[in-house]
Image (tube, helix red, strand yellow):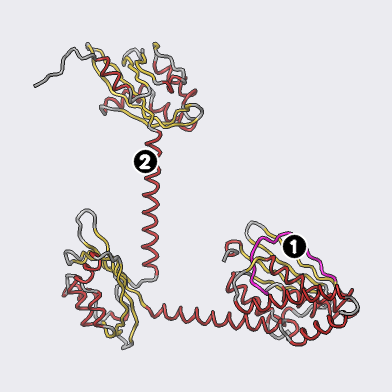
Amino acid sequence: MGTISDALPREAIAKALFENYESIYVVDAETAAYRCFHESDSFSTLRFENSGDDFFRALKINILRTVFTEDQPFVSRMLSKEALIAGLKEEKYYSIVYRLMINGKPLYHKLRATTDVLNGHTYILIGIRNIDKAFRLDKAYAKEISSMQNKEKTHLEAILASAEGYLEVNLTKDSILEISPIFLPEEMSKKTLNSALENAPSYSAFEQWMVDELVVENKSRYSRISNRDYLIRCFEQGEQRATVSFSVKTASGAVQPCKTGFYLYKDAPSGDIMAFCVIYDLTEQQRREKELQDLENELQLSRLRNFASQMQPHFLYNALGSIQEIVLEDPVYASRLIGDFTVHLRNCIRAMAHDAPIPFEQELENIHAYVNIEKMRFGDKLKVVFDTKVTQFSILPLSIQPIVENAIRHGIYERGEAGGTVVIRTEEDEHAWRITVVDDGVGFDEEAFRSGKGGKKDSTGLNNIMFRLDKIMHAQVSVKSRIGEGTTVTVTIPKEEESV
């Protein structure tokens, strides 16, 4: 059997070990005299003194010169002579992590100190290692783990938010681990949960109690899906979720629709197959689905009403008739008007098909086309000012153009020969986009408008537009008007809803 010779150079062993360190210092514990026995190329750029008579005095200077600014108070405190000696008395190794400025970059280093006694004299051995890459990888990994844990927590909270309750079970051991106090609807209180658990302590027995005592519709399917053996087979076949809908009979005799979701997973330490069972009351879900359907129906009717208000026969006939009159007199102008009429008609038809938000530039194109048609009819009596530098947002189709139409037809036109001005302005701030339509027309009674008694001309399509903007974009519409002075309509779209 071979042996290792005592003659093996200790210098070679030390050099091999030193490769793991940027720097190695030996400090006399009594006098604080020190000497550096190893220094890497990158560490040499810091220009530390390799020896001296007071390690801790030199350390104070070097901390200010080489340690990352935010870490300096910490390093000064932890590497004071008192803290270092006290730490080494408590533990064999004393270590801290901090950042050194190497080539202008803060890099994580680990300082590790221990003591050794040689010839009755105590020395402090200090090694400094560059751990930047490993430390940052550990931080990234810890951040990823924390993110995953938060995500799992959020998912669980989302699952339980609309649930009546939950049940956590060990399928392998056929045992109930946890059950929420509201696992069953309150109306079933006469068939108490406590008595069920007393008579059916295992998961299999509890599910059989459910089938026998509570489930009244889809009983056979519920019995099959909730079965312990069936759920274990599902998991073994790669399925992580199973659901079943059923109905229970409440204490009042009503039939209540429910759904249970079984979320399957394996417990890592034990290897047991687990299930997290969540029960939902579908009564509330059905009510919400009906409300949603009613809202969708109302929005569809709202779109149709909006389309119908724009496609009134008299507007079409008057516009086409006016264009026909000027075809021979000014064919170039007539051609432009036919183009505007086509743009307006196309936008109206498109708005009937869907109510998804469109770029404001597209709605603005329709407004320009409509205004050009009205200017042909009203002539110099109508002045329209566009102050629309802000356009990078979305709006419902055919929502601002009808407001402009109201301003022209029920504000300016009714002033007769005096005519008037309509201003269309767009603005934004940190929280919202705003579109304002101002006219100096005849105005109307605000109170009568809000009560619905303002007459057809004062509210043509406006209530309809307010409904659509509120339900789809959560936008607010304010209307201010004074008889004889004019009307201001402002649409405010919250920026967090603009991308809807």
Point out the stretch of residues depicted in magenta.
383-398
- Check the picture and name the quadrant holding the N terminus: top left
Left of 80 or right of it: where is 268? left
Residue 385 magenta: yes
Number of numbered discs on residues = 2
Q: Residue at x 62, y 77 (%)?
A: 467
Q: Position of residue 297 (x, y in %)?
A: 55, 82
The reply to whether the C-beta atoms of the residues labelled 1 and 2 are less than 8 Å apart is: no
Left of 304 or right of it: where is 190? left
Occupied quadrant, residue 391:
bottom right
Residue 269, above or below 413: above
Q: Residue at x 31, y 20 (%)?
A: 125
Q: Badge 1: how crowded within 10 Å, few (<14), some, or many (20+)?
A: some
Occupied quadrant, residue 394:
bottom right
- Which disc is residue 388 wearing? 1
13, 56: nearer the viewer: 13
Query: Nearer the N terminus, badge 1 or badge 2?
Result: 2
Q: Amino acid at mark 1?
A: Thr
Q: Amino acid at mark 2?
A: Asp
Q: Position of residue 253 (x, y in %)?
A: 31, 88
79, 138: nearer the viewer: 138
- Which disc is residue 138 wearing? 2
